[in-house]
Image (cartoon, grey):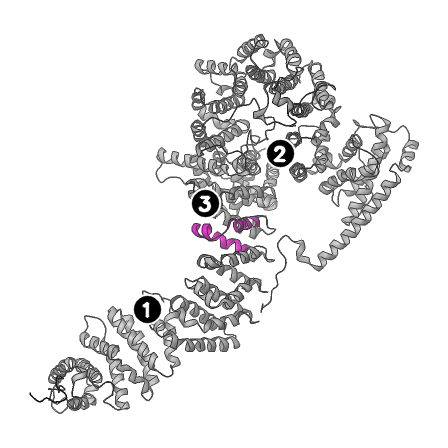
Amino acid sequence: MVATTRTAGQPSPKKLRFRDKLVGKGLSTDTLLKKLKQLHQELAEMDQEHVDVNSLAPVRKDLVSTSILLHKDRGVKAYAACCLADLLRLYAPDAPYTQNELRDIFQFFFRQLSTGLKGADSAYYNEYFHLLESLSTVKSVVLVCDLPHGDELMVDIFRDFFGLVRRDLAKKIELFMADILIALIDECSSLPSEVLEIIMAQFTDKNARMDQPSYRLAVQVCNATADKLQRHVCQYFTDIIVDRAREEEFDEVQTAHDLIQQLNRACPSLLHNVVPQLEEELRVEQLQLRLMATQTLGEMFADKHGQDLVHKYPSTWAHWLKRMNDKNIAVRQAWVEKMKGVLVNLPDMRKETEEALRLKLLDPDEKIRAAVCKLFGQLDYETALHHVSVDQLKAVSGRGLDKKQSVRVEAFNAIGRLYSLAYPEIENNDPAAIQHFSWVPSSILRSASINRDVKALVEQTLADYILPLPTLPASSASKGTETDEVAWTDRLLLTMRYLDEAAFGILSGLTNLKVVRPTIYEKFVTACIEYNGGVIDENEDAVTEKLNVAIKATLPQFPEPGKAAEDLQAFAKLNEGRLYKLLKTCMDVQTDLKGLIKARNEFLRRVEQSSSNLLGTMTIFLRRATLHIINQSSISTLIKRVQKGSEPPSSVAYSQTQSQNIQTFSMYAAGGSEPEGRTQQAAHAAQVWMTFVSKHCPALYKAHIGEISKAIADERNTRLVEVCLHALAATAMWDPKSAPSDKRTVERVLRFVLEANPRHAKFAARLVACMSDSEKLCTQVVESIADSLEEVEPDKLVAHIAVLAQLSLRAPDAFEQKSDVIMAYLVKQVLRSAPDVDEDMMETDEDWLDDERMPIDLRAKILALKVCRNRCIAHAGSETALDIAHPVIRMFSTVLQYEGSFSADANDLLFMRSRLRLQSATSLLRLSAIPSYAQEVSKYFVQIALTIQDSVYQVRMTFLDKLVALLSKGKIPIQYNMVPFLAVHDPEADVKSKAQAYVVYALRAMPKPVRLERFEHSFIRLLHLLAHHPDFRIEQEYFPDIAKYIQFFLDLVANSDNIALLYHIALKAKTVRDAESHSYSEKLYQCAELAQHVIKAHAKAHSWNLETWPGKVRLPPDILRPLPSSEAVNEILKRVYLPEEALTWLDEKQSKHTTEAKEKKARAARAPAAAKRKAAVPKANGSAK
């Protein structure tokens, strides 16, 4: 067996073969470079584990000689650096040099790298790459940490590397640098502050982003050494913030906070010790620090790492949330602004953030409330859908009623913009989008009735977000334009699907269809043209006055009447003919959608160029004067949508309870029966709009007569036929020349007149009355119907009476040829006939049936009453008017007297009686609007007025609708203005609210002389009406009810200017007598005394002076008569008509009212913010705990 040594199997240490001298005289650069290259190649191949380090001693000494380290040739120094790096590798872990030599070596290394490493194509790139790789892998660079003045060298290395990396070098070189810097930080016992500053500087660079190498290197180093750097970073920021804040150098402090935000985005783990410091800043009294901390933490919580931050620092999160109640508005505002990112990135905190934002919507400061609303307006659709609840959005919408304009603007913009973003998804029938956003238009529209400022904002929001005008296509091709028109109209129909009745009523008013033409805006343009910029040839005063009157008429429509008056006057002085022409085009009802948009855009552009300060006023002018929601371009789409819809549930001859805006509107948001299918819904909405256009602006149909005439041929689609017949009839009434005259259409219309569908028959009859040969055609129709009345089927009878109701009004001559036969039949066979209903109906105790459920004979009775009424209206100007009307008026009053029956002993069903009461009362209202009948109808005024207190809700509400419509137009006598005050005791809030809304609107809209006549001076009529009220009793249990009528009037009408007048009228009531009887006179005096006490109490509660009225008041002679003598007057004035218990009750009431007023005033003094609708003052200070 062969003997072996203990090292058998292990290779012997490898010795360096290189024996040449590297230093010495006469050594040329080329020779030296060749030797160094040879040495580098051999050293690079040697393995650290198998090297004889003693053999390296000669070259070790030569390589650190100054002749090499300071050699002028770059190549020599590059190879020398590689050789030195290899030696350090081979000697590791021991260093073969002294500390001073090592310091020189590392300085030499990094000097070569900073001066020589410039890119892959630069000289000696491979050598520099080798040097970096060696330093990175061997980690020999850590020796720097133990050298004297190593801190300085370390600073130089960091500075050089962050400068070097900017040269856009290879990715691998960047990684080598990161390894070297990380090793230095990990090994150093104390990190030099300059190193940290160098690192931080990479984050403060304005170009700091991940595509920048220096920033990328800093991020890599910080993330790898976060544990080591945390303490240093914390101290770094503490020093800056504390020192600079003490010296009030807040720009430096702000820079530090910006740096924290930047670090959080890239290296959040660095800040674990900084976050508690920021939390402390939230508590300090110094405003700037608290503000910066709030902003900085807001950014950090809003970052993608925010959720981790909340979990790690729940205390910081809680204290940051408390900044919403900071005593300083700037801090609260900063908090709100940062909440957008928090909403998006912290879904788990939704409950807390939502509650906080809900409270900030009620912040005492308007800037905060506006900022919260603006925040929601900046959200994208997905965030709003998934991270904001419907309740929260509705709370934002509610700020549209804020007292401050700035808040209202932001609230409407926010909620409108979100709806606009959601609309495509609503259109796609996305249930989530519908549930989350479809309510928005209805909410916005209902706000319009608050005041003029809010109305203007609602219109702006509609125009910008809800129902915007389409943009004109790039190409003028008709196909593109048509698509826009269809989409525009369909958007209206889809939006309407989710409106409630109140919202639709407001929307229909904003369409500008329901106006008298020429409109006040058209009159203004005409006046401007005549004014000619102030250059007037003749009648200068008259022309100027005409312009002033036109401007004054438009002012109530503007939110700022004063500015509007100035702007409109300035517009008139501009006197630009092109602007007038464009305005006329915009206002013309025959202008199509494309023409409207072109003219509108050019008009606004020219106004801005001519006088930009007029733009706001003229924009509102355009919205009020043009058909920007529905116009003649909508008609074709509406017809097509009706065509595609299925049949409506049923047809009735009329809708007795229809509102003034729509015929049968119970759209789906209110929870009514929803038609199946979107096609059916669109058809229903289109029908409603066509009915509205037919009633208020049939001129839109002028360009579509052929299309509409063709549509009535589709007799299977009864809904389509109905709306198109209505449209044709309305257009023919507006312009008889537009009535169809072709034989086929006329024959078809005549067939509809005599068929069994009451709606078709009604509108066909109206159309026939407008045709060119109407007298002959109407006579034929009347004779045909009159001859067949006795034998006609019940279904057809209703349709025939519907026709007679139309012809008695629109073709009275034709009707009168058979009026004796017709009226005798209607009175004897229809009105006074026993009800023909089935047994189930006989047993019902319902007091009201909807239109669809009404039995045929009840429909016939109501239509028969309409025939009687319309016949009176048609003959109002004839000599026989009163002869015709007297029995009719008496019949209507009889129905009211017997509560819906024609005799006292009639045993009619409750629902029949309520329907007949309603029809009789509304018919008398209509007849009272005719001067020749007003006096006769006024005899039954009390009966008519008491309809507003009918036992059936539908009767009260419908009567009030009709009453308000007639009062708004000033068509009926002034005493009817007192009827709405009888609604004060109504058990249903909406009846009282509607009555109140009319009074408030009328008081605001009427000129002062008209208001005085219709309200203040009519106060005596209210007292007279109460005296004639069947429930009037001077007994203790009735006092509060009677006093409540008077109080309701005072609450709405009285003010500091007119309270003395009202008191004067109450006094004057005891200087006259009732025109009817002495007993009513005493009731009037009692009522007047009661009014005096209530007025005095009301004045005292409001701290108004009740002075003697200086003027004279003429009391109405139609209801009051003068007393026979002054002695009688004095006697009545001295006498107290109220009983003792009434006076006692009044004293107690006044005492109680005074006490409550004092308590309320005291509470208001203790908590002044409680009187505002905004919010209570939050618990706020600089250091909320």
Disc 1 + disc 2, Cβ < 8 Å: no
Quarter of the picture containing the N terminus is bottom left
933 up-or-down from 369: above or below: above
123 up-or-down from 902: above or below: below
Res. 464 in view: no
The 10 Å Cα crowd at callout 1, few under 14, some 14 to 19, many 20 or more, is many
Which of the two residues, 1065 or 569, is positioned nearer the viewer here? Answer: 1065
Left/right placement of residue 964 relative to residue 254 reads right
Extent of the magenta region: 370-398
Q: Which of marks 1 and 2 is nearer the N terminus?
A: 1
Residue at disc 2, secondary structure: helix
Q: In which quarter of the image is residue 503?
A: top right
Residue at mark 1? 216
Residue at mark 3? 433
Residue 488 coordinates in the image, percent (x, y): 44, 37
- State the residue lying farthest toward the top: 787
Left/right placement of residue 228 relative to residue 958 reads left
Measure the alpha-carbon separation of dots 3 and 1: 42 Å
**Amino acid bearing label 2:** Ala
Q: Is residue 389 magenta?
A: yes
Q: Which residue is drawn at 58% across and 62% down?
A: 325
Residue at mark 2? 542
Q: Does the magenta stretch include residue 420?
A: no
Res. 190 in view: yes
**Amino acid bearing label 1:** Arg
Residue 720 coordinates in the image, percent (x, y): 47, 24
Q: Residue 388 carries which label?
A: none
- Total number of numbered discs in the rendering: 3
Magenta-highlighted stretch: main secondary structure?
A: helix
Residue 74 coordinates in the image, percent (x, y): 19, 80
